[in-house]
Amino acid sequence: MVQPVLVVQGRGVVPADTPVLRADDLGVLRGDGVFETMHVRPDGRGGTAPWLLDEHLARMARSAARMELALPAEDALRELAALACAQWPAHVEGALRLVCTRGAEAAAATGGPVTCFATVNPIGAATLAARRDGISVATISLGYPAGARTAAPWLLGGVKSLSYAINMASQRWVLAQGVDDALWVSEDGYALEGPTSTLVWRTGDVLNTVPVESTGILPGTTARHLLDNAADLGLSAAERMVTPAGLAAADGVWLLSSVRGVAELRAIDGTALPASPHTEKLRGYLGFTNLGY
């Protein structure tokens, strides 16, 4: 059994059950902080490394800037991630989570330091099954029109904050209905994203995703990497709006995320979708097949 890894800024590697957060840490009290989760895979030199680290750190910096949160220097975050991965065995697939909270309430009021730590954990069986077998989703309302977050920056559209209560409640609700995951839909009827994933679909020779700037969805690192390199697969890329009915007519629909990778949608609201012949090619290109675990 592989043990989880915990690395705390300023303290180094500590036992995984070591208390890290104070009771008055604003990450706990208000979800006030940012985080990134990365896939840990072999680095080709006998060790492991977080995949797309540069992209995740860039998104973390953007999220922190939007929240007026002073992150540690990028080199310090890289060191934290590297130290965590150095403790992880190369034969085990892992998930690195890098977390920065605003810190203790009293200290934060005077510009005190953030609380920053990294963990690595094994990938759960449900995540691996979703990657392998695909998933069913239910569309659920996000409660406001597709463009609402763009006009309301206080809604923190596009920010990966610790405030994930709605995301988790969405997934718990659909699981209780016998469905694997949720697909958020705007009040005006557009499919947007999953609570922890980015929507991608194929029409002909085009890979599509939902535009970030006009909707305020979280910019997915895995999806962005795929679309930016679509030419490697003989495809082009586009950002466009889509309805759930439009997805049902696509040549393949997927929810992409950093750890689960490529999860093919096999049903939307109880309507079965045919298996896409393109899924395995996407998984292979993104490095989520033949991992040897």
Image (cartoon, grey):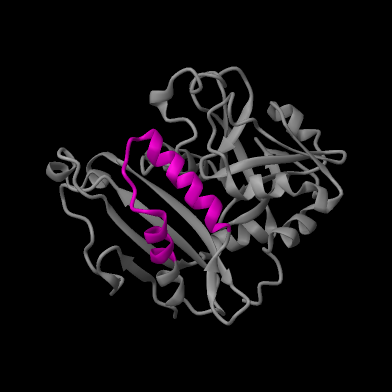
- Rendered location of residue 190, percent (x, y): 64, 24
Q: Nearer the viewer, residue 4 or 247?
A: 4
Quarter placement of the C terminus: bottom right
Asked if residue 34 lies left or right of residue 138, the reply is left
Instruction: Give the residue at x 39% y 76%.
Output: 3
Query: Magenta segment range?
Result: 52-81
Quarter placement of the N terminus: bottom left
- Rendered location of residue 124, percent (x, y): 51, 64
Q: Note whether residue 132 is visible.
A: yes
Whether residue 79 appears in magenta in the rendering, the answer is yes
Q: Note whether residue 179 is visible.
A: no
Which SS does the magenta portion mostly show?
A: helix
Instruction: Give the residue at x 29% y 71%.
Output: 12
With respect to residue 217, does 37 lie above or below?
below
Instruction: Give the residue at x 40% y 66%.
Output: 79
- Rendered location of residue 227, percent (x, y): 72, 44
Q: Nearer the viewer, residue 238 or 260?
A: 238
Q: How many marks?
A: 0
With respect to residue 284, does 43 lie above or below?
below
**Quarter-wise, where is residue 189 in the image?**
top right
With respect to residue 14, does 150 lie above or below?
above
- Rendered location of residue 139, percent (x, y): 59, 32
Asked if residue 180 lies left or right of residue 235, the reply is left
Instruction: Give the residue at x 15% y 39%.
Output: 110
**Quarter-wise, where is residue 201 in the image?**
top right
Whether residue 59 appears in magenta in the rendering, the answer is yes
The single residue placed furthest to the left in the displayed view is 106
**Quarter-wise, where is residue 212 in the image?**
top right
